[in-house]
Each structure stands twice: as C-alpha cells, then as structure tokens.
Amino acid sequence: MTKLGQAVRAPWSFIQDLKIQQKLILLIFFLMILPLGSFTLLAYRQTSHTIQKNTVYAARQSFEQAVASLESKINDASLISDYIILDEEAARVFGRMHAPYPIPMQVKDSAYLLRLFRYLMRNQDIYLIRLFVPDALMYAGDRQSIYSVNDIGDAPWYKRLLNSNGKVLLTPTTTHYTETTGAIAENEVLSTVRLVKDPYDYAANIGVLSVDLLRQDVLDLLGQAARITSSGMIYIENGDGLVLSTAGAELTDAWRVADPAAASWERTTVNGKEAIVGCRTIAGTDWRAVSVIPLEDVLSASSQQRNVLILVMIAMAVVAFLLAYISSVSSTRRIYRLIFKMRQVQGGHLSVIHQNFGRDEIGELAESYNFMIKRVGDLIDEQVKTGQEIKNAELKLVQAELKALQSQINPHFLYNTLDLINWMAIKHDCPDIESLISSLSRFYKLSLRQGQDIVSIGDEMQHLRTYIEIQNHRFENSIELAWDIDPEILLFEIPKITMQPLVENSIVHGIQMKPDKSGTITIVGRLESDSIILTVRDDGAGMTEETLAGMLRQPSQDAGHGYGVRNIHERLKLYFGPQYGLSFSSRPGAGTEVDIRIPPVQGMGASS
C-alpha cells in the first residue's frame, strides 16, 4: 500500500468507526459550514469590490466637480480682467498715465477706476481687484484697489510675469490693503495677473492688473471633494512641481506623487504606499490638481463589512451545529432503543417494544420488529402447547417461515434506513448524497425483485445502469456505459444478476488497472437463430492467456474475478442446458470481451 493510500485510509477508518449520531452531526455541520464559508468569502469579495469601486467613483466625481468649479472661478476672474482692459474709459485712463497728468484728472480717473472695480467685485467669486500703477501717480498710494508698482518689484511672480510675453498668469499672491476701520489685513489669494499696456504704445508697460480669488475659498471647495474619505487629500501644483495649495489631510512627502499625469484612478504605489491617484490639468493654466486616496481608506469600509459577514457566519455555524445535534439525537436515540431490544433477543428474551416510536421510518422499523417477535413467539407457543416433537418437515416449515420473516424485515429495514438518510440529505440540501442513496435504493430493489430469480433483459439492463451510477459516485464518473441492444430481445428473460458481476469484473480487474483508471463498458445484444447473444466488452487492461484459460475451470479466492464468473456460468447451464453459458476473449492492454449465450424464452417466472 502506498503512503498516500495509508494516509487516506486512516481518517476514513476513523470516520467509519464513529457512531451514527457523530457521523450525522459531522455531516450536517460540514455540509452547512463549507457552503456558508464559500458564500461568505464570495460575498466579501464582491462587496469589497463594489465598495471600493463606489468609493473611487464618488471621489472621482467629487474631484472632477471641484476642479470644474475652480476652473469656472478662474475663468470668471480672467473674463473680468479682459473686461477691464477692453473698457474704453479705462483704456483712456491707461493712456494718460505717461503724459502730463493734471491732478484733477488723476482724481477723476481714480474715481472711475474704483467705481468700475467695485461694480465688478459684486461677482461672488471675486475677492479683490488690484491695479499696480507707476509710483509717480497721485492715486498710487490708495492701497485699497490701486497700488504702486514698486510694492511688487521684488515679488517672484512679477518677474515671471515680465517674461510671460503678455500672457495672463495664474499665481498665488498676498494682498495688503486698508479696510474702512483703518486696520491692515493680509490674505493669501490666487490671482490672475497681466501686464497693462499703453494703448498708444503697446510695447510699453503701464502697470499690472490682478483679479484675486481668496485662497481659503479654493481650499474649501477642494476640501469638500477631499472629505469623501477620512485621510484623502487634494493638492494643486504648478508646472515646476511646486505645491501651491493643499486641501483635506496634511500633505507629506510620503504622499507626493512623482508623476501624477500617469495616474488613471487605478490602484498604484506612491513612495511604497498603496493609493488611488487621480490628476487633472486646470484649463487655461499650467497648474494641475492631484487627488490622493490612501488605499486603507478605501478598504476600511469593506473591512467592516467583512467583520459583519464573519459574525453572521459564526452565528449560523452555531445554529447549524445545534440543529445537527438535535436532529441526530432525535433519530439515533430511538435506533439505540431498537438495538437494545435486538440484543435482548440475542440473549433469548423475546419482548416487544412498548414505547411510541412515531410514524416515520424508524417507527415503521419498530413495528416490523414487533411483528417478527410476536410471530416467533406464536410459533414457540404453538410448539409448547402441542407437546410433540417437531418433525423434520415441521422444522423445515418453521425455518422457512422464519426465513420469510427475515426476508421481510431485512429489506424493510434497509429501505427505511436508506429513505431516512435520503430524507435527511434532501432536508439539508446534499444533492450528491441524495443521488447516491436513490441509486443504491433502486439497485437493491431491482436486486431483490420480491424473490424472483428470472427477470427480463430490460429489467437486467435497468439494474446494470443503476449499478454503474453507484460506481461512478465512487470512481468520480470515470466509467462510461454504452449499449446497442435490439429492442425485440428486451422482453426475453434471463436469470437475475447475471450481467452485474461481469461488469464489476470489468471495472475492478480491467478499467481500474489502467493508469488513468477510466474507460468504457459496452453492452451489445442480438438474436442469432435460436440463441440470444449478450456481449460485455471493456477497454481495460485485459488478461493473459493463462488467466483467461482458468476463468471457468476452477474457483478462485477472488469472488469478482473467479468464483462469481464461474457461478454465473454454472447457473446458466443449470437453467437452460449445457450448450449455454459464458465464453471469453481478451488481450493484455486491449480489454476483455464476454459473450452470454441464452435461449430466447419468456414466461419462466421462477421464484426462490
């Protein structure tokens, strides 16, 4: 025996030695736990995938909406800047800044510009409009909306603006202005800045125009999108990779994305950490918004769902165990009582069962036991009352009656027990066990045939198909049965259980000896002159000439391979005559073929 065979046989022997109650508990318990565990795992995976997908989708939609709103704000600021530059009166004011500029005219021009700025700042998105003009102008010190260009001479963004070839530049700046209370306030803003050209000499710069958005408003807008997850963050960086603003969780170097443009809202690695990264360039700028969602945020919701599923599975497992225990105790307790009574019978105490065993299969079994005990008791009472010795004929009669009673109760016990197990398999949704028990029940019913020894070829084929179904449960559907039988011979008769031992021999000593342990058994039936020829052919390992020559000459210790075949051969000769029986042909590696020759007869109807 191989090591693998020993490893399998040990636990199988242990299971076989368990009590029926323990087997039922284990069977019901594991048949519920395995599907339930598989369902829990599948449900967790699907739920986790759905939660991750929905979380990423919600974060992406919120991010896209926030960036679109930011683009709208920036576009509004750019349009206001264009409106000021294109305003005719403002253009005339810009044109007078290099010419001799009388004070009254400066006062009038500054008043117009302030009115224009206040009117345009009614747009809720605009925080402030600032104009930086030459310091020589009287209104350059207004410091509410008009400032001296000297105030920004050292600002890095002003140097980049001078090198921008007249383009509008979006940049973070700082505002300083005097409120009506006289206090000095400082706020960080995002500004669209542009050079103001002399309308009469476009190569000359008059000043700088800045339309400002409050940085906190931008952060609040992005923060709403970042709050989709607990530690998600959104930050804005310029084309040089400089971070301008951050919303949501605090941005650390560990969560800076090296190449955000390559992200596509899929799982990626950011400095060795798992995250979902999205990126979008802000229209009309060289800025880009980057969303970073740590993967642990996405998985946290699915982890909670997993814990709930595990708790539900544990609760259902406990319920399954309790139900299995209650069901097994209910069934086996009455069986143990019945076994106790049977053991008393073995000791010579013939007593019926008085307890109520119910109306199920076990109850019917108890009724059959009571009937047998009463009948045996009646026979013994008859013998005692007569006071005469039982003659040989009478003894044979009593033995025949006892044998008849045994033939009644044993199949009844078998059928009821099989039906009980089949019912429990249906109740607990075990289709493989249900199929096997149904096949086994049909097999024994066809085998017993109410005591008949002669059956039709059609019934024998039905018995054979049921046998193959049972064997395929054992050998994992490795046996295929094919037949080609003339319909006209199906009603002719044959001794019961003639073909099944031959097919068993083909499986055990033919197909199972092949390396792949699978094969086909073919049954061919035909009527030739005064005989019916039934051929059982397999594609198994075959036999040597020596083995084949001794098949029908002498019995073997192997019932399937020798004695069973010889027994069938002798039965056929006994029933039909010496010219009928079995014949063999075989080759090693090419399979075996057995011919069954019987006469075409009907209506024999012999019984045991």
Image (spheres, grey):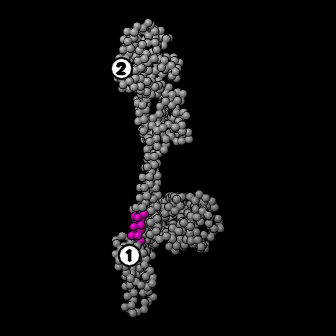
Q: Residue furthest bottom?
A: 387
Question: In the displayed structure, would residue 329 be above or below residue 351?
Answer: above
Q: Nearer the viewer, residue 519 or 457?
A: 519
Tell me residue 75's x, y (percent).
Answer: 42, 24
Q: Amino acid at mark 2?
A: Arg
Disc 1 residue crowd, few under 14, some 14–19, many 20+, Cα 10 Å: many
Magenta span contains residue 377: no
Tell me residue 447's x, y (percent).
Answer: 46, 69
Q: Nearer the viewer, residue 339 or 417?
A: 339
**What segment is highlighted magenta in the picture?**
321-332
Find residue 366 and name its label. 1
Tell me residue 582's x, y (percent).
Answer: 56, 68
Q: Nearer the viewer, residue 473 or 571?
A: 473
Quadrant in the rendering for residue 369: bottom left
Name the residue carrying label 2. 118
Lower position in the chain sequence, tag 1 or tag 2 = 2
**Picture residue at 53% right of the left edge, 61% below the top:** 475
Q: Nearer the viewer, residue 30 or 155?
A: 155
Quarter of the image that includes the N terminus: bottom right
The answer to whether residue 467 is visible is yes
